[in-house]
Image (cartoon, rainbow, N blue to C red):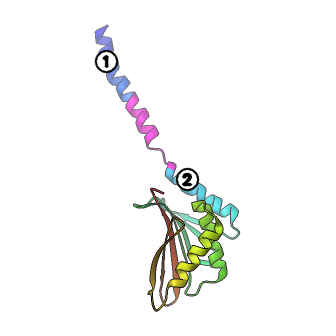
Amino acid sequence: MALGLRFRRPTLLAATLALVAAFSASPARADRCEDTAKELRNQIDGIKISINTGNIIYLTHPAAKELSLGCRGRNYSVELYAKADRKPKPQFFELVAAAGAIIFTIPKPDVATGSSRCIKRMGLLRGDKVSMRFRRLNMECTRTKTEASIVVTRGKDE
């Protein structure tokens, strides 16, 4: 009897370790990010999902030159990146506000106010790169001679 129990322990241990490994390696983060991208596509007219590269989902919209949804960085859980002309049109701000409201679950006017402040602060006095915090969102705006972009994130601990 002791001999049979001795051979069952390693088998039971191996089966338990296999179950733990199977459940701990679930791709829950990627699914959450894909679900957010699908929600953006369903709720905002004109957004299309173009390429999914694991941590970044590239989106397209007529109001933006580039649009992407980043998932799980070192200091953030979700990131929204949008690029437009040097002087963005109101449709661009509307797109960033709608997408930010869906992604970060905060009111749309708050995202609209923060993103427009960030873009409009760039200039002679503050330079071509502005970082600011508004309503628990981190915003970083940059511009070149032809383009302006905004990155909106929220820290992991918030």
Which sits earlier in the primary sequence, circle 2 or circle 1?
1
Please check the rendered image and state whether residue 44 is part of the magenta-colored stretch, yes or no: no
Q: Secondary structure at mark 2?
A: helix
Question: Where is mark 2, residue-wise?
Answer: 32
Question: Where is mark 1, residue-wise?
Answer: 7
Q: x%, y% of residue 70? A: 50, 64
Q: Are marks 2 and 1 in contact (CB under 8 Å)?
A: no
Please check the rendered image and state whether residue 27 is part of the magenta-colored stretch, yes or no: yes
Nearer the observer: mark 2 or 1; the answer is 2
> Of helix, strand and loop, which mostly describes the magenta segment?
helix
Task: Residue at 56%, 74% (x, y): give it.
Answer: 114
Find the residue positioned furthest to the front.
135
Amino acid type of the residue that numbered disc 1 sits on in the rendered structure: Phe
Q: Is residue 63 visible?
A: no
Q: Is residue 158 visible?
A: yes
Label placed on residue 111: none
Q: x%, y% of residue 40? A: 64, 63
Task: Residue at 44%, 38% (x, y): give it.
Answer: 22
Q: Quadrant of the N terminus?
A: top left
Q: Is residue 45 above or below residue 65?
A: above
What range of the chain is rendered magenta? 16-28
In the rendered image, which quarter is residue 88 located in?
bottom right
Dot 1: few (<14), some (14–19), or many (≥20) neighbours within 10 Å?
Answer: few
Dot 2: few (<14), some (14–19), or many (≥20) neighbours within 10 Å?
Answer: few
Q: x%, y% of residue 102? A: 62, 62
- Asked whether 56 or 83 is in front, the reply is 83
Q: Judge from the rendering whether residue 8 lies leftward or rightward of residue 110; answer left or right.
A: left
Amino acid type of the residue that numbered disc 2 sits on in the rendered structure: Arg
- Asked whether 23 or 106 is in front, the reply is 106
Task: Residue at 62%, 67% (x, y): give it.
Answer: 99
Q: Secondary structure at mark 1?
A: helix
Task: Residue at 40%, 29% (x, y): give it.
Answer: 16
